[in-house]
Image: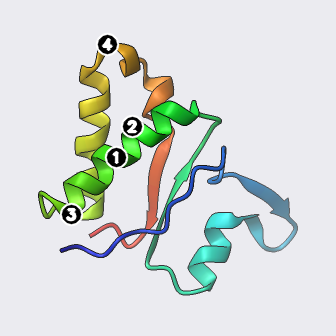
Amino acid sequence: MASSPSSWGYSRTGLGKEIKGEGLVGLTRGFMYAGAARVMASLWKVDDRATAELMKHFYQGMIKDGLRPAAALRAAQVQMWKQPRWQEPYYWAAFVLQGEWK
C-alpha cells in the first residue's frame, strides 16, 4: 500500500501568506517542515460534500486499488468529473499534491 499524504478539508489550504525573504508560507509548508512527505491541499474553497466524495474515491484508490497518491488523486478527479452532480471543475480541480509525488 502506498503511504498516505497529509490531507484535510479546510478551504484554500494550499494558499498562504507572502513573507518577505521567505515566499509563500502556509499550512502546506508547515506540514512539510514537520516531516510530511507530501500534502494534499486545495487552492480554493470547495463544497464540503464534494470534498468528502473526492476523498472517498482518493483513499479507495490508494487502499483498495493500490494506487500511488498522484494516481489515486487523478483517478478520483476523473471519477468526480464523470458524475453529473460533480462534473464542474470547481468541485474537483482545486486539489493538488505537493511534495513527493510518487
Quarter of the C terminus within the rendering: bottom left
Amino acid carrying label 3: it is Ile
Dots 4 and 1: beta carbons under 8 Å? no
Q: Secondary structure at mark 3?
A: helix
Which of discs 4 and 1 lies nearer the camera? The answer is: 1
Q: Earlier in the sequence, mark 2 or mark 3?
A: 2
Residue drawn at 39 percent across, 37 percent down: 53
Instruction: First in sequence, mark 4 or 3: give its number.
Output: 3
- The amino acid on which the numbered mark 2 sits, given as a three-letter code, is Glu
Q: CA distance from mark 4 to mark 2?
A: 13 Å
Evaluate whether residue 73 shows in this view: no
Residue 50, placed above or below residue 57 = above
Assess whether mark 2 and mark 1 are in contact (beta carbons under 8 angstroms).
yes
Q: Which labelled disc corresponds to residue 53?
A: 2
Question: Is residue 16 found left or right of 78 in the rendered image?
Answer: right
**Residue 44 % position (x, y):** 63, 37
The percent coordinates of residue 30 (x first, y second) are: 67, 75
Going by the numbered disc 1, the residue's amino acid type is Lys
Callouts 2 and 3 close, C-beta under 8 Å: no
Residue closest to the eye, 53 or 72: 53
Q: Which residue is mark 1?
A: 56
Q: Which residue is mark 3?
A: 63
Quadrant location, the N terminus: bottom left
Q: Which mark is residue 84?
A: 4
Marks 2 and 3, how far apart in space? 15 Å
Answer with left or right where residue 12 lies relative to residue 8.
Answer: right
> 25 or 88: which is nearer to us?
88
Residue positioned 30% across, 56% down in the render: 59
Marks 3 and 1, Cα distance to the nearest angstrom? 10 Å
